[in-house]
Structure formats: C-alpha cells, structure tokens
Image (cartoon, coloured by chain):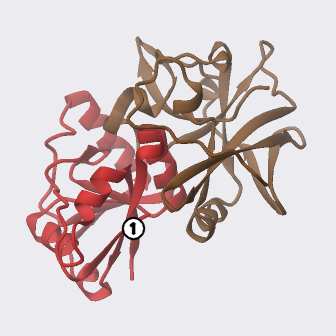
Chain colours: A brown, B red
Amino acid sequence: MAFLHSLVKTQGNRTRGWCAPAELGETAPHYVSFVIPVDEKGCFFPKYSCETITTIERTKRIDSHDLVQHGKESFVLRLDEREVWFAIRPVPRDDRRLPYVGKLKHADFRYSFAEIEPADPDKLDRLYEDEDTFIIGCEPFAHYAGIKKPGHIGRMKDEG
Amino acid sequence: MPVLYHGTSRAMATAMAATPVLGTIDVTRGRGEFGRGFYTQASSGNAARRGQTLYGNSSAVLILIIDDHAFNALNFRRLTLNMAQMLNAQLKANKTRHTFRTPHDVMVGPLVYQPRIEQQKFQTAKVQTLLNGLLTQRVVK
C-alpha cells in the first residue's frame, strides 16, 4: 500500500518537486507538507498507509493506520475514535502533481505527489499537546533507503 | 502568554533549554525564510513533525513560554504573506539567508508554504537575553 509522506517543496536540478527534509537538513522549509502519491493516470489510491508517532517517556512508538479516500478530494484518518480529515490543497495548476526530486529511495517515489492539508490544523496540534502524538505519514528513517540515521532508532511494537 | 515551538534534535533542545535559570539559545546561529535568527512557530504538531523528519527518534520540541509583558514590549516587524514570500525569494536568490536581519527584535509572519501557521524569528541580543532568562520558561518535550 502506498504511504502518506511528510515532504517539503524544493527545486532540484531545475525540476520543482518534493524532497525529504532530511536531505536538506536545517535549511529545509519550516513547513512540512503532507503529500500522497497518485497513480500513472494521476488518480488517487483508495487507501494510504499513515503512521503516527507517540512519545512515551522519551521512547517513540510508531503506529500504523489507514488514510482512506472519502469523496473526490477528501481523505479521512481514523485514530481510535477520532477522525482527522484532509483535503486536497488548492495550488496553482503546475504544482498539482510534482515528482520526488531528492536522492533517497522509496517504492512510492516512482509516482508523482499531490499535497493534502488537514481540514482542522488545530486538531493536530491538540493531538500533540494532549496525547504526545503526531502524524508523520511515512517515518523516513524507518522507510527511506539512503537516509543517514542521526541516532539509534528504537521502535516499540504496538501492543494494543 | 505566548507559547512557541521549535522542532529540533533532543540534544540541541536540551542544550538550549539548559537550566531553569539560564538557556543557551543563540540568535546568530539559525537561518530560514526570514534570514538569520532563531525560529519558532505557533504549530506544535508541525514543529514535532519537522523535528522528526530531520532527526528521527532523536528529535524533540523546545517549548518557549514567554512572559506576556516582556514579549509585548519587544519591537516587532510584521510581514504579510506577500511580504514573506517576496523576502524568502529574495534571500534565496541572493544567498543571504545566513546574514539577513533587521533592527527589530522579532520578525513575525506566516510560514511561506503554509500561511495558516505563524512563525517568529528572534534576531537581537536583547531578545536573546529574554529567551534565555527567567521570563521565559523553556521545556523540552
């Protein structure tokens, strides 16, 4: 299943596109976009894998969920009893489908990406402030080949 | 009381938070869409996500809770989205992100790629003293 990814928009080799922030380091833009791959016809997949990260006493737990298409340009992520809605972000026509232009590798990087944004951004902030949980989509250090790991990755299996 | 967020590595966040009495935030070290300075933003979730995408499980969020009176006494330069986009483009073209600053204590404006989120750039020695002193709580999450 394809993933939701957290990427930044950049210009690489004269091509405008998406890149993992880790490839740019601290020079990466401060807003990290949510992007989803589209198929060869430019259509959305019916479902995407979406990871969340919860911090528990300095250890980070990665949980997998499904981001499901709901309507033409809306998507819903169900976290337990909570629903987080996303919609396609309105962008100029030339930016609606952009490729991955970095050097890291992932099966999804053969596709072009469309940007989505949360319908209620405050909900994501409350999720982090109240429950130490945030949406990452595809954890880069666990899934992207060629990424330089900054530190030990400890991953707890979800026992729930 | 403004609560602002800075996503980074746990090591850097811990170093900046330092003791409850004194921090080590350095406004001359950072760079971003508004040039040289120390950046924070209003979105805790985005700060956490940015930290994670850069530092993985070594990431953390430095939370700054600044005294109202001291914060409102600062000299602000506020940018609209258009101004923020133009400044970002100018600094990128001139390659001056690491040097550009103004005499204001703080530059405030939207994130260039997400105008719903406000960002703040702290850039003077005076505001550095505020961020590192007793009137700012520094918490690492």
Drawn side of residue A151 relative to residue B113, left or right: left
Seen in the picture, residue B131 relative to A141 is either above or below; the reply is below
| Amino acid type, label 1 | Leu
**Residue A63 or residue A70, whichever sits in front:** A63
Image quadrant where one finds the C terminus of chain B: bottom left
Query: Which residue is the extreme one toward the bottom?
Result: B69
User: Element under label 1?
Assistant: strand
**Residue A51 or residue B127, whichever sits in front:** A51
Name the residue at 27% across, 88% down. Answer: B69
Residue A158 image point, x, y percent: 72, 49
Name the residue at 29% across, 59% down. Answer: B14
Image quadrant where one finds the N terminus of chain B: bottom left
Residue B72 image point, x, y percent: 28, 81
Disc 1 target residue: B4
Drawn side of residue B46 relative to residue B70, left or right: right
Seen in the picture, residue B102 relative to A98 is either above or below; the reply is below
On the question of residue B93 being in view, the answer is yes
